Image (spheres, helix red, strand yellow):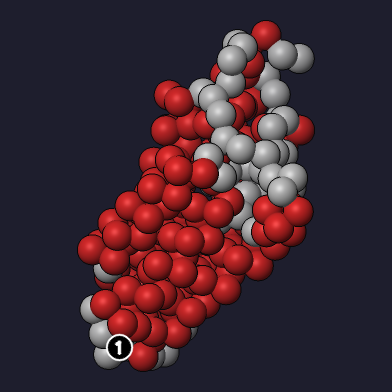
Amino acid sequence: MMNLLLLIISAYIIGSVPTAYWIGKIFFDIDIREHGSKNMGASNSFRVFGAWWGTVVLLIDLLKGVTAVQLAQMLQPGDWLGSEKILWQLLFGLIAVFGHIFPLFAGFRGGKGVATLFGVVLAIQPWTALISIAAFVLVVFLTKYISLGSMIAAVTFMICVWFAFKETNVYLRWFSIITAVMVIVNHRSNLARLLKGSEKKFSFPKRDKKKES
């Protein structure tokens, strides 16, 4: 049980790495949570920092999800439900997402966890993840709404698991539902603005954010 507890804590700490917050503080001398959409995630990093640093944040946040899933490889035979590897992959991944949303190293004020969540999906079901990411890119390209792209990607993942690939693993089926619900709930304010027509469209910064105080 001690080994399992350490793995759970490790998953949370991995998720708690506040990539966008640290990059903002170190390279731009700002708190990203006070700029743009005031969200500590990859999409706001593109808005505030630009394409290069936005990509860095996106890749690291994705990697957090991928890394958390790999912790299941360290389970020992005596661990509770130790034989249910896929279950622990999903649980460690969700714990990392929780860490991203409530990061220990940034005052428990984090992002919405989309990039880290899809890092989990990418590690476990790469094809469904790639299809979901393609849906995200297409929606954002056509509408310029990051939030809408994120929600459509999450729903696409659920549809792929249940219908396109007809996944039989009950844990993955439930995880796909949890993923869709989690993303939509975390974007409920964005959804309300979308319905009102007041949601801001995505665009890269036109000025040097390093000069902001």
Q: Position of residue 147 (x, y in %)?
A: 58, 51
Residue 9 appears in the figure: no
Which residue is nearer to you in this view: 2 or 134? Answer: 134
Q: Position of residue 172 (x, y in %)?
A: 36, 81
Question: On the picture, is 7 further left or further right than 39?
Answer: left
Residue 209 appears in the figure: yes
Which residue is nearer to you in this view: 34 or 89? Answer: 34
Looking at the rendered structure, the secondary structure element under dot 1 is loop
Question: On the picture, is 70 further left or further right than 35?
Answer: left
What residue is shown at x 36% (from left), y 64% (from top)? 121
Picture quadrant of residue 18: top right
Quarter containing the C terminus: top right
Which residue is nearer to you in this view: 135 or 49? Answer: 135
Q: Few, some or many C-alpha atoms within 10 Å of disc 1 (few <14, some 14-19, many ≥20)? A: few
Where is 30 relative to 156, above or below?
above
What residue is shown at x 26% (from left), y 77% (from top)? 164
Q: What residue is pinned by disc 1?
A: 169
What residue is shown at x 60% (from left), y 11% (from top)? 208
Picture quadrant of residue 40: top right
Q: Position of residue 97 (x, y in %)?
A: 53, 61
Q: Position of residue 184 (x, y in %)?
A: 60, 66
Three-letter code for the amino acid on which mark 1 is drawn: Asn
Where is 26 relative to 108, above or below?
above
**How many tags in the picture?**
1
Question: On the picture, is 85 further left or further right than 23?
Answer: left
What residue is shown at x 74% (from left), y 45% (from top)? 198
